[in-house]
Image (cartoon, rainbow, N blue to C red):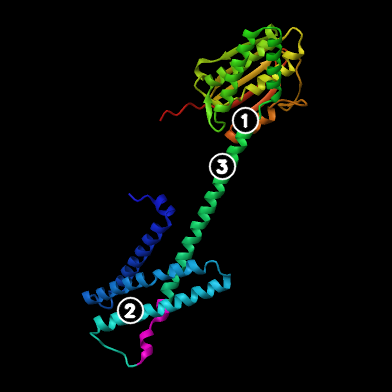
């Protein structure tokens, strides 16, 4: 079976396939048109010779057209017409010689200009060849430009997603390093060592995971657990975390570190504002054919208008929505609402996808 895609991508193979196939088609059409003229083997032989001559003599046109392609438009047109005309004269001479030598057994005309008799038809046929050549060449150039544009767009799209994913809030690192410094000063070396280890594991996860690819929810939960373990050292008993992750969602694919900025927001604007601390609830469940992710807190709440959070210096919400849009187009939802009885709840709905093991 012919692989048409590879054929069209290989310009050299495509040219020779179409070139030889086109001249074979010319011979066949000439043969069919000869039913009313002559069906003897000698005439068929002349047709085949004419097609072979046309096939060979038109090859130089390809290299001439390549050479003149960089000229000015009018000069290109003049060069193409002149080249095609001269080649058609030469082809017509060969065709006439085939007829006179083979079909008419050595007959010669008295006038020299009879050698070019019928050159207009030859010129027309070679102009058709020329039109097909430039048409296919321009189509290939357009396809290549389209592929380059798509490739550039895909690379820009991937770079955009990576940029969004790697915009981790520096406050988290500063706070963590300050906490580690404090632990060292008060001689809590074992706790400081555990905190450094968790920070290392969390950063390794955030840098190792390709932002273009999605990860199983269980990996995301594990990384989020590392982050929360670090924060618990800072907040101690003031931070209470509740997990409500359904068993059927552990293998679902989600964008890496999609929940961490939401939890960070909850800590910054809820837990840190409450003297007695508060609760963060992280939930995941199936919702029809979608996966529903929720992060809720019982903090003081915030101004919410049309499902959007109005808060100055917010951490990562716009970032998250841009990432979701880049990965899922319009097939997602991102809603911020008031939690019951107090606080803020962020809900993300994305398509339910599993790892393709095939």
Would residue 18 be found to the left or right of residue 283 on screen? left
| Residue at image mark 2 | 95
Task: For marks 2 and 1, give the CA distance.
Answer: 70 Å
Instruction: Give me the residue at 55% from left, 66% from top.
Output: 70
Sequence-first disc among 3 and 2:
2
**Is 299 covered by the magenta stretch?**
no
The one nearer the camera, 160 or 283, is 160
Residue 75 vs 322, above or below: the answer is below
Magenta residues (range): 111-122
Taking the image as drawn, is residue 36 in sight? Answer: yes
Q: Is the magenta stretch mostly helix, strand or loop?
A: helix
Extreme left residue here?
Answer: 41
Residue 34 on image: x %, y %: 29, 75
Q: Which residue does the numbered mark 1 point to in the structure image?
A: 165
Q: In this view, does 349 lie to the left or right of 17?
A: right
| Residue placed under numbered mark 3 in the picture | 154
Q: Where is residue 222 in the image (x, y as percent from the top left)?
A: 55, 17
Task: Report x, y in % for residue 288.
Answer: 54, 24
């Amino acid at each position: 079976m012919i692989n048409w895609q590879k054929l069209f991508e290989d310009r050299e193979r495509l040219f020779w396939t179409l070139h030889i196939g086109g001249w074979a088609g010319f011979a066949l059409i000439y043969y069919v048109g000869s039913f009313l003229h002559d069906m003897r083997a000698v005439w068929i032989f002349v047709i085949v010779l004419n097609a072979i001559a046309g096939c060979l003599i038109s090859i130089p046109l390809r290299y001439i057209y390549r050479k003149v392609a960089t000229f000015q438009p009018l000069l290109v047109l003049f060069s193409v017409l002149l080249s095609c005309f001269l080649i058609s004269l030469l082809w017509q001479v060969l065709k006439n010689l085939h007829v006179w030598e083979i079909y008419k057994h050595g007959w010669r005309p008295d006038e020299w200009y009879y050698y070019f008799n019928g050159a207009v038809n030859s010129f027309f046929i070679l102009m058709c060849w020329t039109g097909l050549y430039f048409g296919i060449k321009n189509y290939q150039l357009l396809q290549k430009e389209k592929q380059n544009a798509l490739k550039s767009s895909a690379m820009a799209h991937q770079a955009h997603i990576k940029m969004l994913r790697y915009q981790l809030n520096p406050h988290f690192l500063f706070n963590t390093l300050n906490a580690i410094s404090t632990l060292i000063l008060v001689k809590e070396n074992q706790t400081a060592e555990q905190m450094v280890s968790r920070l290392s594991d969390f950063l390794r996860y955030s840098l190792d995971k390709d932002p273009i690819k999605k990860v199983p929810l269980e990996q995301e939960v594990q990384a989020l657990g590392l982050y929360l373990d670090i924060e618990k050292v800072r907040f101690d008993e003031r931070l209470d975390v509740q997990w409500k992750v359904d068993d059927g969602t552990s293998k679902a694919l989600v964008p890496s570190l999609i929940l961490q900025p939401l939890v960070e927001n909850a800590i910054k604007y809820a837990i840190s504002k409450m003297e007695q601390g508060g609760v963060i609830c992280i939930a995941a469940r199936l919702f029809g054919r979608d996966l529903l992710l929720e992060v809720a807190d019982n903090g003081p709440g915030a101004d919410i208008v049309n499902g959007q959070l109005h808060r100055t210096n917010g951490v990562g919400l716009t970032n998250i929505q841009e990432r979701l849009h880049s990965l899922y187009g319009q097939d997602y939802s991102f809603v911020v609402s008031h939690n019951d009885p107090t606080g803020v709840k962020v809900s993300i709905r994305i398509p339910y996808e599993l790892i393709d093991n095939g």
